[in-house]
Image (cartoon, grey):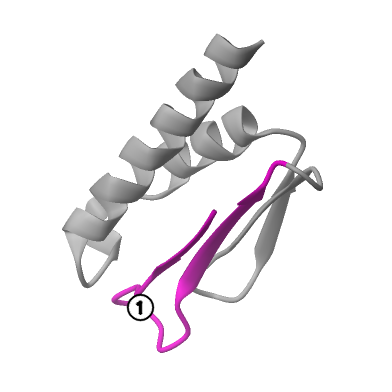
């Protein structure tokens, strides 16, 4: 899964990547710094603690991102 969200603070969008097959869980902030995580759960927790919908041009895209991340984690739990 890859998501792109346009921040109100930067022309460069924020990006979230969850590549479960290759164990890649990462994001890029509006300031182009990045974060790498060991799991989708860690990434989701970070997003919920450090980002909020007011930071983005389209707040609904942020809400959808969080919803999809939570669904992904729940689906993964059901499969294990």
* Residue 73 x, y percent position in the rendering: 52, 26
* Residue 11 x, y percent position in the rendering: 40, 89
Location of residue 58 with respect to 39 vertically, above or below = below
Within 10 angstroms of label 1, few (less than 14), some, or many (20 or more) residues? Answer: few
Classify residue 10 by image quadrant.
Answer: bottom left
> Is residue 39 highlighted in magenta?
no
Residue at point 77%, 36% (across, down)? 38
Residue at point 19%, 58% (across, down)? 59
Residue at point 51%, 31% (across, down)? 45
* Residue 61 x, y percent position in the rendering: 26, 58
Left of 20 or right of it: where is 53? Answer: left
21 or 33: which is nearer to us? 21
Classify residue 9 by image quadrant.
Answer: bottom left
**Which of the image's four quarters has the C terminus?**
top right
Residue 52 at least partly seen: no
- Identify residue for label 1: 9
13 or 3: which is nearer to us? 3
Which residue is outermost to the front? 79
Location of residue 24 with respect to 54 vertically, above or below = above
> Is residue 18 highlighted in magenta?
yes
Classify residue 31 by image quadrant.
Answer: bottom right
| Range of magenta residues | 1-20
Left of 52 or right of it: where is 51? Answer: right
Left of 28 or right of it: where is 21? Answer: right
Location of residue 46 with respect to 17 vertically, above or below = above
13 or 54: which is nearer to us? 13
């Amino acid at each position: 899964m890859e998501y792109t969200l346009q921040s109100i603070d930067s022309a460069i969008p924020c990006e979230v990547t969850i590549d479960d097959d290759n164990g890649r869980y990462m994001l890029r902030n509006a300031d182009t710094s990045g974060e790498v995580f060991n799991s989708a759960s860690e990434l989701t927790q970070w997003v919920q603690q450090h980002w909020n919908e007011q930071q983005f041009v389209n707040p609904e895209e942020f809400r959808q991102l969080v919803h999809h991340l939570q669904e992904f984690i729940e689906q993964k739990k059901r499969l294990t």
